[in-house]
Image (cartoon, helix red, strand yellow):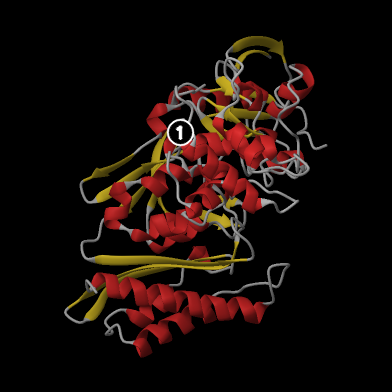
Amino acid sequence: MQVTVTVNGVDHTRDVEPRTLLVHLIRDDLLLRGTHWGCDTSNCGACTVWVDGDPVKSCTFLAVQADGKQVRTVEGLEQGGELDPVQQGFMQCHGLQCGYCTPGMMMVARHLLDHNPHPSEAEIREGISGNLCRCTGYKNIVESIQWAAENPATSEVTA
Amino acid sequence: MQTPAPVDYAKATSVADALTRLGEFGEEARVIAGGYSLLPMMKLRLAYPEALVDINDIPELVGIRVEGDEIVVGAMTRHRDVLDSAVLAEHYAIFREAERVIADPVVRARGTIGGSLCQADPASDMSAVGSALKGTAVVQGASGRRSVPLREFHQGPYETVVGPGELLLEIRYPIRPGAGSAYEKVERRAGDWGVCTSGVYVVVSGGVVTDCGIGLAAVNAPHYSSPAAEAALIGKAPTEENLAAAATAASDECEPSADQRGPVDYKRHLARELTLRALRRASAASQGV
């Protein structure tokens, strides 16, 4: 089936099998390898991207379902050469060790802060509860998101 | 790498369109809602639909509203919106308490209440809630619309009365003035299916329980409910002794099986303890305590 998916503001028209998963379209066809392909069972959240402003686990979402929709991946966090505050927070607070969970963590963090700019620690931990860090670096991930909340970008950035 | 088997796909734009597509594809077609149960099953090749009819972009299936003495929830209402609904919270605390412990925020942003009911997982939280509240499912087929009590909706694990070519439209929950409700769940880790869950509503009037509903998931309770426990409680004062007797009846009525989530005696213990905790809180809420 022919689909047109807008990824980080750029339209991509492709012919895909209906069974193709969104994560594979993003990584293998559009070659956006920032989105990680993790557990493949919708548990780990490494593959989290946004579709029309909501987070989805892209290993459990068909590419054809994204036809006509806006997809935002981790590559779309950076705007005009400026890293998103969430990305800066992960740098400042050592929010990643191996880096595998990081793109999913950052996508849910950005979504959380867009809807709740001043989350409590409990709200942050709830917000990232669909994302697993096997280095168990949750403490620094939470601190990274707190850093981003305390240092928001001067202009609002959304997909 | 897990990939579903080849499958046809159509995105429906309305209920009528979805029914037409289901008719065209035939008996081996399946409806895809949030997809967080169906797609993993397709990836594991436990499900082999020949075609998918996507109902994610049908606005008429979404929403929560009060109609007369019922709350109506559209089948494609996302778990997140059930969790956040002020209307549902006003009438039944059980919804928010159950939704808070379903999966995780990303899954709740996509998964739907209708999908949960139709998936009919034995541990389905929303099925326990629906049976506790004695709701009604509204199912549409090519030849018309029918209402099915949720306690007759499930025919077994992963099996419902929704037939080929049919679509669950909405779920209706009776409003019960003065009812208190609560949900209790024990899971092995955050976001997991329950080892056992129990959800109840209780109406206390004139010092006795005049109405109640008790639902359980993951312990093979008949239609996710416990009529024996309800019968044990109706007409009784909501004392600790009477609540405990009802909870024991619920535990006796379920038929859990041993699996990786625990042995039978542990699940029976949970069925009693969680039902008792839920009954305590719901009856206190009904009495304004």
Q: Which residue is mark 1?
A: A114
Relative vertical location of residue B78 with respect to residue B236 in this rendering, above or below? above
Q: Is residue A135 left or right of residue B53?
A: right
Relative vertical location of residue B27 with respect to residue B107 in this rendering, above or below? above
- Residue drawn at (63%, 62%), measured in percent from left and top? B189
Residue A143: x and y in percent read 58, 47
Residue B132: x and y in percent read 41, 63
Relative vertical location of residue A48 with respect to residue B151 in this rendering, above or below? above
| Crowd class of label 1 (few under 14; some 14 to 19; many from 20; radius 10 Å) | some
Residue extending furthest front? A92
Residue B186: x and y in percent read 56, 68
Callout 1 secondary element: helix
Residue B236: x and y in percent read 28, 84
Work out whether residue B167 can be spotted: no
- Residue drawn at (61%, 33%), measured in percent from left and top? A88
- Residue drawn at (51%, 24%), measured in percent from left and top? A52
Q: Which image quadrant for residue B280?
A: bottom left
